[in-house]
Amino acid sequence: MAFGKGCHLHLIDGSAFIFRAYHALPPLTRKSDGLPIGAVSGFCNMLQKYVEDNAGPDAPTHVAVIFDKGSHTFRNDMYDQYKANREAMPEDLRPQIPLTRRATEAFNIACKELDGYEADDMIATLACQARKAGGRVTIISSDKDLMQLVGDGVEMLDAMKNKRIDRDGVFEKFGVWPDRVVDVQALAGDSVDNVPGAPGIGIKTAALLINEYGSLEDLLDRAEEIKQPKRRQTLIDNRDQIELSKRLVQLDCETPLDFGLDDLEVKEPDPDTLLGFLTEMEFRTLTKRIADALEVEPPVIPDTTPEGANPPEDAVEAPPIDPAAYECVRDMAALERWIAKARDRGWIAIDTETTGLNEMRVDLVGISLCVEAGEACYIPLIHKEAGGDDLFGSDDLAEGQMGVDEVLDALRPLLEDPAVMKIGQNMKYDAKILARYGVKIAPIDDTMLMSYAMNSGLHGHGMDALSERYLSHSPIPIKTLLGTGKSQITFDLVPIDEATKYAAEDADITLRLWQVFKPQLHKAKVTRVYERLERPLVPVLAEMEMTGIKVARDTLSRMSNAFSQKMAGLEAEIHELAGQSFNVGSPKQLGEILFDKMGLEGGKKGKTGAYATGADVLEDLATEHELPRRVLDWRQLSKLKSTYTDALQEHINPDTGRVHTSYVISGAATGRLASTDPNLQNIPVRSEEGRRIREAFVADEGKVLVSLDYSQIELRILAHMAGIDALKQAFRDGQDIHAMTASEMFNVPLDEMTPDVRRQAKAINFGVIYGISGFGLARNLRIPRAEAQGFIDRYFERFPGIRTYMDETVAFAREHNRVETLFGRVIHTPEINAKGPRAGFAKRAAINAPIQGTAADIIRRAMIRMPDAIADLPAKMLLQVHDELLFEVDTDATDGLIAAARQVMENAADPVVHLDVPLVVDAGKGQNWAEAH
DNA sequence: AAATTCACG
DNA sequence: GACGTACGTGAATTTC
């Protein structure tokens, strides 16, 4: 908003705030390292009070905190004694000065200072400018030097006394109206600032004289007329000194500012930045108060009480991890004690142990809990008795275990209590296990997701890795309990005392990680990402995964048989063409046949010395010989059979008749999900034969599958982020974006567009998202490299903003070692400043990550909102495939579902981000996934 | 366990 | 001047 009529500018005298805060508070120090912090604390409190007090209907439109800078100003040049009797700044205040600047910025309030000028001059200049522009001004200060500015739309406000000072207030103080205040000050002088004035004349006398003679100039000119002899002589003798004093107290309205009023617009504070700063300062009360005001969770500030001058990293005192100290809970009295402790704390770390990894099938073996570092327990439930000479244990339960139902009934109120935070590492797993036992665990925190929000791109987020990295502790490897390979046992066969050490340690580590991560989230500025994009996805995905999708086993089975037959035929032909029998599935053997035995041209060995026989190589060879084509066909069938038609059958859950994938929230650095066991995000679709596999993914009786997918979401995001007007307009007009790109690049009118030209433009559009290179485009389009480079050059010529965006993204990454999505997701790019080919990879990844990541954020937001949006419909969300959501819905509710889901998806960016391009969602429906897509 | 290949967005 | 080059995934298979 441009500053003008109707605007209201607040100018805060920052230095006055600092000194008030310093003197009002005892010399507080930061607990962890003893840094003096009292003035900063008071300063923040005053700023917060200011924000709260000024939120009403008369709220400012523009605001700035103005600070003094440097000790030497133009007034010292006029008069070397100016402010000379000022006491030096107290030693414990000096280090706090920069922190008050950071505090102001953390509140997202403009923070201004100018070397060689006092804050008062900047305030005067800004007030003048604001009045000229037709706006109102309030100066938050009680400094009398500023009173000369009052009147005609300018007021002062004493923030501590909450008292407004207008023209009348100034008159009360100086006995003159604001326009004569400098005259009075010039006569009366100021002992604080060491302004000399006229000896023996105070404010009262000065006001009397000014009122009688009208102005200081007239008074000095007519000093002879003053009746009192002593007063007359003083004015005559000290004329120069009085005139100097006036120049000293007169504020400069022409301060050269390097910013304008428009730059001072009021902005909402960013919760992460603000709370991050307050957390760093360890202001517990204020952090909580502001977190409440911002309606986010207050960060936990670790309680660090060093003896003496311990460095902060040593200050986080936690007992060493000692598995021998953990308790095994075997009776209800003990369990109740743990539940009481958890209620007392308000949080508890929890981990479940099971007979395997498939959440839909395994049994709950035990539960571990931890309420405080080092204080953890394990509740064994169905451990088997070690059975005599039977290596695999007996079927009898071991002694001293409570019943599963008994324990869960006791824990359920705690685990479902909204007032107790349940902390876990990969909570989706535990939530699904517990859900199958009738416990809806909530609310939750997840250390894996905290690490992901802060450290994506830096390292993995598994518990062992996190423990090593952040706790310097290597957890007991699960292998030592279960063994490996064929002789591997399940957790229920582990002796209870060993299980206790392992399981309770996991809960202990999880709690410690939580204590490390929780305050870091705010400092890393990813609280919103964690709280809005990661954590809420856990119950949504858990529900989807438990629902699963119906897969027709007989369809897959028939396909497998058909593939087998075709493969056998192809294999015989291949052996015939090769003149010998060999394993077609072995790239090594195939390479030797093709390049050594048959002597085909173009054999290239990779770093391991094996010939490359990838699809692109075989494709080129196919013009020379029949064999490579046969191998390509065979490979396609082999892939479809082994990865899909065979493997999917293994994944059909016998209880539900459905396939239940598992999504990894922290799998992809960009924010995308990953699907495993089985991967349902790479079911074939591009080839006709492959697409038929989707016919096996079916709707239940009386239902249909509905697929909704974002149209060109990444290109739309690129158009928005890079600010490409032509692309944005094309999307608004619903144009064919690839045809439009082709038209712009090749100067072909849209109605004369050929499919081939459009195809090339499409490849360029996608290439751009990936950090295009001439080589890559040439390979993709199978055209000469120079030609591909020509296309790219022309593309950037036509859309220079894209190149700017890419350059800026890479420059940002090089400076900060990270990039960000529109929603604040952070993706670290640790390799960006590496040398050699790694730098190229990192650069392209950095260009791609904000685009892919923003698209991922958007569909996450849609998914998180979806359960509420479709709650009244007989529909379930089943799958996510990056830009597609698949639903199953009662046939007669299909249209309602499409409308509701589309509404959520198309508006998923709002209100956090307003995209300059519309998001368009295409819908399809059918009895199976092939029809729906 | 690494390398190769190929399925998806 | 050479080098290596589209981004992000997971799974099956062969090979060492």
Image (spheres, coloured by chain):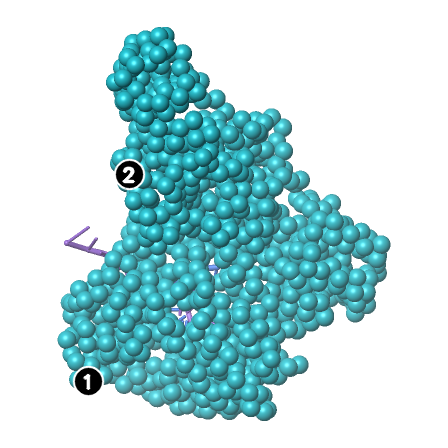
Chain colours: A cyan, B blue, C purple
Element at badge 2? loop
Seen from the viewer's position, the closer of residues A751 and A357 is A751
Residue A649 seen in the figure: no
- Taking depth in this image into account, of A782 and A876 the one nearest to the observer is A876
Percent x, y of residue A40: 51, 34
Identify the residue shown where x is 27% and y is 65%. A724
In primary-sequence order, the first of circles 2 and 1 is: 2
Number of numbered discs on residues = 2
Disc number at residue A257? 2
* Image position of A716 with respect to A630: above or below: above
Which residue is depicted at the point 72% across and 70% down?
A437
Viewer-nearest residue: A188 or A391: A188
Q: Say which residue appears at 45% left-offset and 66% top-offset.
A: A910
Label 1 marks a residue whose chain is: A
Tell which tag, 2 or 1, sits nearer the viewer: 2
**Disc 2 from disc 1: Cα separation:** 55 Å
**Vertical order, A403 against A55 (above or below):** below
10 Å neighbourhood of mark 1: few (<14), some, or many (≥20)? few
Q: Which mark is residue A178?
A: none
Three-letter amino acid code of the residue under disc 1: Asp
Measured as percent of width and height from the top left, residue A413 is found at 75, 62
Q: Which residue is mark 1?
A: A751
Q: Is residue A502 above or below residue A156?
A: below
Q: Is residue A136 visible?
A: yes
The percent coordinates of residue A92 (x first, y second) are 50, 24
Q: Quadrant of the C terminus of chain A?
A: bottom left
Secondary element at image label 1? helix
Quadrant position of residue A762: bottom left
